[in-house]
Image (cartoon, rainbow, N blue to C red):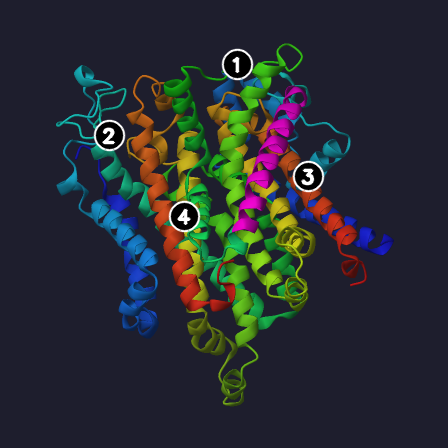
């Protein structure tokens, strides 16, 4: 490795550990029903397995990659896929297979981290807004309507334009459009939970607002939260790909799937189709898997929305 | 209907006002001064020129005054000056509008023509092989980046037909066929993605309606399938579909940003990217506001269409 991958690894570790934290939060519905989920939703389970493989590939990129992902090789530019370069090489002679493996690290980390950030911030806003209600709710909801009104990619574009390209800023830029969508889902379930008798009981026992909101309401929003995360994860990956494609996403030298498809790579597409085919397939496959998994989980957790 | 129209107009106006605040604040997050960025990227060297730019942009004024001036300029239709081209931004944007509008409408047409019939078919044949296939296809549409799909379409055209659409803009008055083909493929790439959402919502909305009593009655009296599905069910299933079409229109503008770049079409969306890359911030601010206006107008149209299609909504 010629460049430091520590910031990415940090984001990645943060993202993965928080996912586990979220999973253990609700052990019954996730681990207990794991096998039943596999039996009833084989396609969803398959998609989950595929995502897991991708995450493992990202984690063990050093072992799995056959070449240095950023080393250029002037003698083997635009090489056809062969036994040395499984997916061929790009216009600078970099091995596309290794770049996809390392790119998984960047793309998945950015996807997971931005989804988590957007969902957590949106979740907190949704809980506060839904629990307290009144004018606070009204104001918050109008602001969220405005944020949601702007096209996702345009908002992310403006954010990166304002913040400048760096991995952290890209994560923030992608997470901002997720906030209004996340808070809407969480707020809706908070509004329903707020009316339950046990909340009234907690109030009668003198539990404070924060205690009720985060101790008694929050755990019951985990279902919608997980559905939301899987749904937004796919779109976060797509937005990252588009931003990087336009040269506004993850900066060099980090290989990201979107950057591999960037405008400069597109110029070589007709001579060397593998330059665009493989990275694009990687993006599509991950987003497809997360959409399938998201649909399956939603069907299980929220039967009302089935098929929607 | 008048009260409904009035309420909708007020909401749309307030939303636009809010969006203008959001856009203004977001672009003020720029680390450092806009002038410094313009200064370094435009290659000015004279420090006096720097102050002049600051004055010209009104950056020497307090933030609320800057905001007020910006709103006033927009109200007067002044979109500021492009520092890249050194001409009023409006002159750069204006010829680009028809390109984006044409592409967006064509893509929307593709999306509706592809999404609605497949959604209906999928709902009518629920849980059949056709249903699963169509749902997988639509999910695939949601999963592919539309710009990548555009690249793949170009590659396929090259290898199968040995031909690609013109990569420089062709005016419809010059050569209509070349112009149409140039727009058709990007519209397919963007439209396929949008058709997936339309298909999913059509399917679920049709499934709801098909379970209603009056549909069972229609079947029971021996009505033909075509009439039950299209005459009775689809009519009542269109409302959610229209909402999604309205929302999709906003998303489509996002999709166009990249697709116009892939197919090298000189549209508004692509100009936004160029302006960001050139750090032409006054133009970025105005273009995003322009897009916001288009989005709000699209949503307003959908709301009004609602009131017209479903008389119950007017009285709420």
| Among the 4 quarters of the image, the one containing residue B17 | top right
Q: Seen from this angle, which residue lies furthest front? A: B222
Q: In the rendered image of this protein, does residue A259 appear above or below residue A38? A: above
The Cα–Cα distance between marks 1 and 4, rounded to whole angstroms, is 33 Å
| Among the 4 quarters of the image, the one containing residue A231 | bottom left
Residue under label 2, please give it: A96
- Subunit bearing disc 1: B
Are both tags, 4 and 2, on one chain?
A: yes
| Main SS, magenta residues | helix
Are both tags, 3 and 1, on one chain?
A: yes
Q: In the rendered image of this protein, does residue A217 appear above or below residue A40? A: below
Instruction: Judge left or right: residue A307 versus residue A256.
Output: right
Task: Classify mark 4: helix, strand or loop.
Answer: helix
Residue under label 1, please give it: B168
Using the image, tell me which numbered label, if any, was put on residue A234: 4
Magenta span covers which residues? B92-121
Are circles 2 and 3 on residues that touch, CB within 8 Å?
Answer: no
Are circles 3 and 1 on residues that touch, CB within 8 Å?
Answer: no
- Residue located 30% across and 41% down the image: A106
Q: In the rendered image of this protein, does residue A115 appear above or below residue B211? A: above
- Subunit bearing disc 3: B
Task: Classify mark 2: helix, strand or loop.
Answer: helix
Using the image, tell me which numbered label, if any, was put on residue B293: 3
- Subunit bearing disc 4: A
Task: Classify mark 3: helix, strand or loop.
Answer: helix
Using the image, tell me which numbered label, if any, was put on residue A200: none
């Amino acid at each position: 490795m010629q460049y430091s991958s520590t910031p990415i690894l940090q984001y990645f570790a943060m993202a993965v550990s928080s996912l586990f934290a979220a999973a253990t939060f609700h052990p019954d519905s996730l681990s207990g029903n794991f096998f039943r989920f596999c039996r009833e939703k084989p396609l969803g389970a398959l998609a989950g397995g595929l995502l897991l493989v991708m995450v493992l590939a990202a984690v063990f990129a050093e072992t799995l990659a056959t070449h240095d992902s950023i080393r250029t090789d002037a003698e083997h530019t635009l090489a056809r896929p062969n036994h040395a370069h499984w997916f061929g090489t790009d216009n600078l002679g970099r091995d596309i297979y290794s770049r996809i493996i390392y790119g998984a690290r960047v793309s998945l980390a950015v996807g997971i981290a931005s989804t988590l950030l957007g969902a957590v911030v949106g979740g907190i806003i949704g809980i506060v807004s839904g629990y307290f209600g009144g004018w606070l709710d009204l104001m918050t909801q109008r602001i969220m309507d405005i944020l949601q009104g702007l096209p996702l990619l345009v908002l992310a574009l403006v954010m990166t334009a304002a913040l400048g390209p760096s991995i952290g800023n890209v994560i923030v830029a992608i997470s901002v459009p997720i906030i209004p969508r996340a808070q809407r889902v969480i707020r809706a379930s908070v509004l329903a939970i707020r009316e339950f008798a046990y909340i009234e009981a907690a109030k009668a026992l003198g539990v404070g607002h924060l205690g009720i909101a985060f101790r008694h309401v929050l755990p019951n929003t985990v279902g919608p939260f997980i559905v939301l995360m899987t749904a937004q994860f796919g779109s976060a990956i797509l937005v990252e790909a588009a931003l990087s494609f336009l040269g506004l996403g993850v900066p060099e030298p980090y290989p990201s799937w979107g950057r591999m498809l960037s405008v400069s790579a597109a110029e070589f597409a007709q001579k060397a189709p593998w330059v665009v085919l493989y990275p694009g397939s990687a993006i599509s496959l991950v987003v497809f898997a997360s959409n399938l998994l998201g649909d399956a989980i939603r069907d299980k957790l929220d039967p009302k929305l089935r098929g929607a | 209907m008048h009260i409904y129209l009035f309420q909708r107009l007020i909401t749309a106006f307030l939303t636009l006002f809010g969006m203008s605040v959001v856009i203004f604040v977001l672009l003020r997050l720029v680390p450092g001064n806009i002038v410094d960025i313009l200064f370094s990227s435009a290659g000015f060297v004279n420090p006096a020129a720097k102050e002049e730019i600051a004055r010209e942009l009104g950056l020497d004024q307090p933030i609320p005054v800057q905001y007020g001036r910006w709103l006033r300029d927009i109200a007067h239709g002044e979109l500021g000056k492009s520092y890249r081209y050194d001409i009023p931004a409006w002159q750069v944007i204006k010829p680009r509008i028809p390109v984006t509008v044409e592409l967006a409408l064509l893509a929307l047409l593709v999306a509706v023509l592809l999404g609605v019939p497949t959604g209906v078919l999928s709902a009518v044949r629920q849980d059949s092989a056709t249903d699963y296939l169509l749902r997988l296809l639509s999910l695939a549409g949601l999963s592919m980046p539309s710009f990548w799909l555009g690249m793949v379409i170009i590659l396929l055209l090259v290898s199968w037909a040995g031909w690609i659409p013109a990569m420089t803009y062709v005016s419809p008055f010059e050569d209509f066929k070349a112009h149409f083909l140039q727009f058709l493929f990007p519209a397919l790439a963007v439209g396929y993605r949008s058709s997936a959402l339309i298909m999913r919502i059509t399917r679920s909305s049709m499934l709801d309606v098909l379970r209603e009593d009056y549909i069972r009655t229609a079947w029971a009296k021996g009505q033909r399938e075509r009439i039950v599905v299209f005459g009775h069910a689809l009519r009542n299933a269109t409302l959610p579909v229209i909402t999604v079409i309205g929302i999709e229109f906003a998303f489509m503008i996002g999709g166009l940003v990249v697709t116009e770049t892939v197919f090298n079409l000189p549209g508004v969306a692509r100009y936004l990217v160029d302006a960001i890359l050139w750090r032409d911030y006054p133009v970025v601010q105005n273009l995003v506001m322009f897009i916001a206006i288009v989005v709000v107008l699209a949503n307003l149209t959908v709301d009004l269409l609602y009131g017209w299609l479903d008389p119950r909504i007017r009285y709420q």
